[in-house]
Image (cartoon, helix red, strand yellow):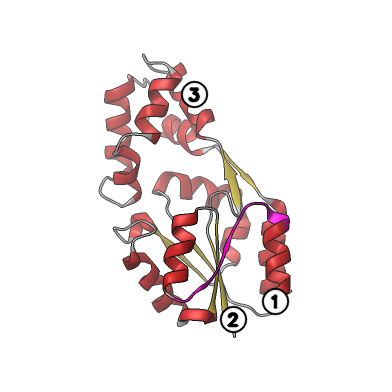
Amino acid sequence: MIKTVIFDLGKVLVDFDYGIAERRIAARGRVKAEEVSALLCQSPLLPRYETGLLTSAEFYREVCAATGFAGDLAEFVGCFGEIFSPIAPMVELQAQLRQRGVPTYIFSNTNEMALAVIQRDFPFLGNFDGHIYSFEHGAMKPNAKLYEVVENRSGCRGAEILYIDDRAENVEAGAVRGWQAILQETPEKTIAQVRKHGLI
């Protein structure tokens, strides 16, 4: 029944720590890391960027204005974007699916800067059949618009799709569309569920 597997990116294929970015930005600005955290995690700024409402340059300028960050854009990309590490068992899972001929897609709420760093540092990103990123489509999960893009890109619907995400609201939005969905708690649990579907 399953014809494609859809992977979220952050906390599924790569781990990340915004605390790293917050401390780096604070060290080059006039505010504490806690204030940078509030800006990135509690204000509308990052969602605006991840829905494509701000360009990278505009996002950088707004962060500079709010924090006093003194570096140029290239330095900022390093501070903000270099916060990722691969989740090796999940990367291997995707490789196994690929070897078995199962199409795989990345489906992520993300932004241009983060994506550029991930593409540079983690070549496995190029091993997917397609990529659906929020900032390119003007919508973020769990908005149904973005799920429609996945269906159109993959050519699959309903139970033909197995979807892996670490956020319950995103998984639920897939399940409403009839997707078979896995809420990632640990890589081991996810892989066990994929195995139960007979995909590996």
The reply to whether residue 114 is visible in this rendering is yes
Which secondary structure lies at badge 2?
A: loop
Q: CA distance from mark 2 to mark 1?
A: 8 Å
Residue 59, horizontal then vertical, whole percent:
31, 38
Q: Quadrant of residue 103?
A: bottom right
Q: Which mark is residue 24?
A: 3
N-term-proximal mark, 2 vs 3: 2
Q: Nearer the viewer, residue 94 or 112?
A: 94
Q: Is residue 184 magenta?
A: yes
Q: Nearer the viewer, residue 64 or 90?
A: 90
Quadrant into which the N terminus falls:
bottom right
Q: Which mark is residue 83?
A: none
Identify the residue at the far top of this view: 30
Height in image: 156 above or below 122?
A: below
Name the residue carrying label 1.
Answer: 199
Name the residue carrying label 2.
Answer: 2
Q: Which residues are magenta?
A: 178-188
Residue under the point 35% across and 49% down = 50
Q: Are marks 2 and 1 in contact (CB under 8 Å)?
A: yes
The reply to whether residue 71 is visible in this rendering is no
